[in-house]
Amino acid sequence: MLIVMQAGATQAEIERVLARVRELGFTPHPIPGRHRVAVGITGNPGPLDPHLFEVLPGVKEAIPVSRPYKLVSRETHPESSVVEVGGVPIGAGHFAVIAGPCSVESREQVLAAARAARSGGAQLLRGGAFKPRTSPYAFQGLGRQGLELLAEARAETGLPVVTEALDLHSLEAVVELADCIQIGARSMQNFSLLREAGRAGKPVLLKRGLAATLEEWLMAAEYILSEGNRRVILCERGVRTFADHARNTLDVAAVPAIQRLSHLPVIVDPSHAAGIRHLVGPLALAGVAAGADGLMIEIHPEPERALSDGPQALTPAEFAGLMAAVQRVRQALAPRAEPAVVPSGAPGQPS
């Protein structure tokens, strides 16, 4: 249920509604908007009687929410949200590019990649310190040392760091040293990790699972928001299909579909979708044309020597060329109306 307050509702009236929700044994989620405050409710096992709340002073109406995901839905939050990562806004017209190597391999490599990302026009730096690999014998990342190298690259370039947490143990180090917690495709339904990421007080980039439906993806995001963290960015990175011409199949339609269902920003990762360097650029441009709020692209100073995912990594020159093409596509789309901006709240606070 969504309780919509009147435009002139006082703080005392809002607090009375929050108290009433708690009295009933449910959890209230205040959602400030441009003109009025709304209150989402979670924890109720079934439909609630709107009159429980409509009799309270300051309440305009109480609306049942039909979606199983409540907090991520546009039914409870009609306006597009903006999520800030290290001061970089993403969503509702704010476009951002996250670039860097698949994995952190050495100080020289990650600094070179970070410099290339910045000079090419990226606003954030990606890089894996903890790597989920299909083979137990493949390079698993440098762990905490990798995080420290990413922090050094951030200090030099000014690019906020996005990196993956594999489990609760690695999450602690990621929260300490990074600016954004990435939850990878393989961990999309690691519900204990999602809950802890929600409690961590930092933005979360949630990748779509290899075979996840949009509803499953949004329900995973709901786990994070239900813990009080509304700073979630969704990332479409391709799904597994029968096709064998690319590593995965980029679901471009997921971008506008998600934007109709949810207020959360959605970006596209063409690198993991493609798995092949020459496909990364066209898929990136397709994501931009579909209305994505950003891109996540793998680059490497020497892709042929990369310890992981070298075939899909762009060189610094290729990345700079792609960024120029991205800018041209965005300029071509510029005349369309931009959605309203609703800044995200502080850690643990709703937007």
Image (spheres, grey):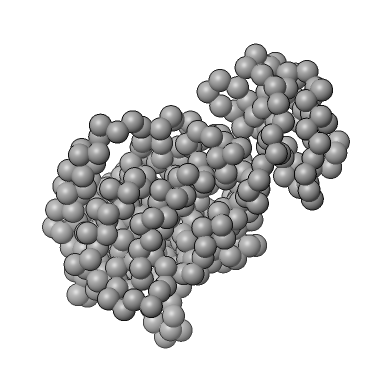
Q: Is residue 229 visible?
A: no
- The x and y percentages for residue 16 are 79, 24
Q: Residue at x 58, y 65 (%)?
A: 189
Question: Which quadrant of the figure has residue 332?
Answer: top left
Query: In the image, what residue occupies the spot 36% across and 37% down?
Result: 94
Q: Quadrant of the C terminus?
A: top right
In the displayed structure, does residue 342 sit left or right of residue 172? left
Front-most of residues 306 and 194: 194
Q: Position of residue 52 (x, y in %)?
A: 83, 31
Q: Position of residue 14 (x, y in %)?
A: 72, 23
In the picture, residue 283 is in which quadrant? bottom left
Q: Considering only vertical position in the picture, is 297 above or below 23?
A: below
For image coordinates 42% across by 72% down, the residue present is 240
| 256 horizontally vs 198: left or right | left
Work out which residue is located at the far right of the displayed protein and give it: 23
The N terminus lies in quadrant: top right
